[in-house]
């Protein structure tokens, strides 16, 4: 009993008894050790905040620290490269898809193939070239890599639609471009717009959905001479912006840098590694000291301030040297291995891919590790790059295509664009290809589904096989089936 319990019991025994009974019942209900408060859970923080409120004031700081780690710490840069390289790879390529309709004006056979080919040609001429980029640098593959890099480092990235006019852009196949913008463009000084609340530059409507973004017209950190001056922001409707981020909790509308859970471990591991390197440098020092036996001054130079490897240094009379015994570097490899494994687990990738250490890895262990990592990669491909970025850009692209078709001669507009993820590297091609063939022959999957899983476009494969057969002059039965399909 506490002092208050004893006081209440002395003054009012009945009330004190109820108080003690209620406390005993509460202690009996709290049977989770982790929920208790004591020495073992001292320092544990468990604020009851929402997904966005938990990082509301810390997001800019986390974003800046994450970028600095990627710039200056090799393992942070490696983690970003592994995630982006596996999620994006050579790029998620689009393929056209038309609705299946009964229309007498649409002829089957070669005309339908020519129709598809013309549409796909326009798609690739615009999306797969720098024509889609506001800055004229990257096609969709390069923009996908930038998006994934930024989602990893910053937690989120904004993509803005830019519609163009033909008289100012006579060479654009489709009058649409997109602009990637970092989250720094959000104007965090605005707190409201009419009846809507604005939090960190994001405007929320009455239902809690995002209605607009308040964006600076230039990056606040841009220090080029023509960019100096007062910052101006503008309100951009949410329909003009793709907000790409990973969502982990219900109601979460903002992203968090992926290094956030492992940032402390990564920083301490880097500091430990630098300390061990310095220790090795000290241990490898070798210098020679010259002291005259007759007491004369053998060395006429600056006083000894530091010792470098291979130095020959004279000592004056009365000076002597005491050799330091640097501590041995023990346990470095094991400590670094465990630390890197912890960081890799926090990022959702394998230790082998993160560290490049393939000791003790065989086909079975490598495949088991890759199976779990591949599942994460597929999730990030589908939920972030394809669902949020590629599908959003495809929707804008088809809308611009429809508007442009009213005034220009354009190929038939497809109903949708379907993205095909890049091929996953095989650990043992002979075993994995035979297993895929067995699945198709057993009827467990279709050939085109397996082709897409391996990163190939079924329409492209069928067309290329038909071309090969026509070139050889001996079309096979399998090729004829592909052509008919």
Image (cartoon, grey):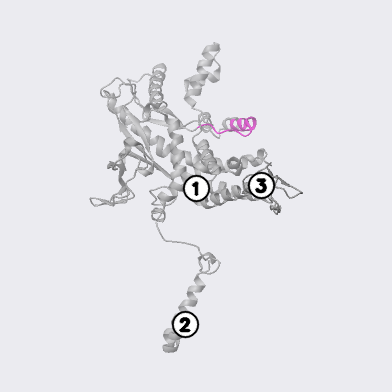
Seen in the picture, residue 302 relative to 477 is either above or below; the reply is below
Tell whether 219 sits left or right of 167. right
Residue 474 visible, this orientation: yes
Q: Earlier in the sequence, mark 2 or mark 3?
A: 2
Q: Could you tell me which secondary element the residue under label 1 belongs to?
A: loop
The location of residue 202, given as percent across then percent down, is 32, 47
Residue 80: say if magenta: no
Residue at image position (31%, 31%) is 399
Spatial CA distance of label 2 from label 3 is 59 Å
Mark linked to residue 259: 1
The location of residue 311, given as percent across then percent down, is 68, 42
Q: Which residues are magenta?
A: 422-436
Residue 432: say if magenta: yes
Q: Could you tell me which secondary element the residue under label 3 belongs to?
A: helix
Spatial CA distance of label 1 from label 2 is 47 Å
> 217 or 382, which lies in front?
217
Q: Earlier in the sequence, mark 1 or mark 3?
A: 1
**Residue density around tag 2, few if under 14, some if 14–19, many if 20 or more, within 10 Å:** few
Spatial CA distance of label 1 from label 3 is 29 Å
């Amino acid at each position: 009993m506490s002092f208050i319990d004893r006081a209440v019991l002395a003054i009012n025994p009945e009330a004190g008894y109820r108080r003690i009974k209620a406390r005993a019942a509460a202690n009996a209900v709290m049977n989770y050790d982790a929920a208790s408060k004591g020495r073992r859970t001292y320092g544990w923080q468990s604020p009851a905040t929402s997904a966005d409120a938990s990082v509301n004031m810390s997001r800019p700081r986390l974003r800046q620290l994450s970028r600095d780690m990627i710039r200056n710490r090799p393992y942070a840069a490696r983690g970003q490269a592994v995630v982006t390289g596996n999620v994006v790879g050579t790029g998620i390529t689009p393929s056209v898809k038309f609705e299946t309709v009964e229309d007498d004006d649409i002829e089957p056979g070669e005309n339908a193939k020519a129709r598809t080919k013309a549409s796909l040609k326009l798609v690739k001429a615009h999306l797969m070239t720098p024509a889609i980029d506001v800055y004229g640098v990257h096609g969709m593959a390069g923009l996908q890599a930038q998006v994934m890099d930024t989602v990893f480092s910053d937690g989120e990235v904004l993509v803005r639609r830019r519609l163009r006019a033909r008289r100012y852009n006579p060479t654009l196949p489709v009058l649409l471009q997109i602009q990637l913008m970092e989250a720094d463009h959000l104007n965090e000084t605005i707190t409201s717009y009419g009846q809507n609340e604005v939090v960190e530059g994001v405007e929320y409507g009455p239902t809690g959905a995002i209605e607009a973004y308040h964006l600076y017209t230039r990056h606040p950190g841009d220090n080029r001479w023509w960019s100096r001056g007062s910052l101006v922001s503008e309100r951009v409707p949410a329909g003009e912006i793709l907000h790409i981020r990973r969502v982990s909790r219900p109601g979460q509308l903002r992203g968090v840098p992926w290094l956030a859970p492992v940032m402390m471990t990564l920083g301490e591991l880097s500091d430990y590694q630098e300390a061990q390197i310095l220790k090795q440098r000290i241990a490898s020092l070798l210098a020679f000291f010259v002291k005259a036996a007759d007491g004369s001054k053998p060395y006429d130079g600056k006083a000894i301030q530091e010792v470098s490897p291979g130095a020959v240094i004279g000592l004056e009379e009365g000076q002597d040297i005491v050799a330091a015994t640097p501590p041995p570097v023990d346990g470095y490899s094991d400590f670094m291995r465990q630390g890197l494994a912890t960081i890799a687990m926090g990022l959702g990738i394998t230790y082998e891919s993160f560290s490049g250490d393939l000791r003790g890895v065989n086909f079975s262990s490598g495949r088991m590790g890759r199976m779990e990592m591949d599942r994460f990669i597929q999730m990030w491909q589908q939920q972030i790059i394809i669902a949020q970025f590629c599908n959003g850009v495809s929707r804008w692209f088809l809308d611009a295509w429809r508007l442009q078709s009213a005034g220009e001669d354009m190929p038939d507009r497809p109903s949708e664009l379907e993205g095909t993820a890049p091929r996953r590297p095989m650990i043992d091609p002979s075993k994995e290809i035979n297993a895929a063939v067995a699945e198709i022959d057993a009827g467990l999957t279709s050939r085109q589904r397996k082709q897409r899983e391996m990163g190939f476009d079924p329409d492209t494969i069928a067309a290329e096989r038909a071309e090969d057969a026509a070139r050889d002059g001996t079309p096979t039965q399998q090729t004829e089936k592909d052509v008919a399909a």
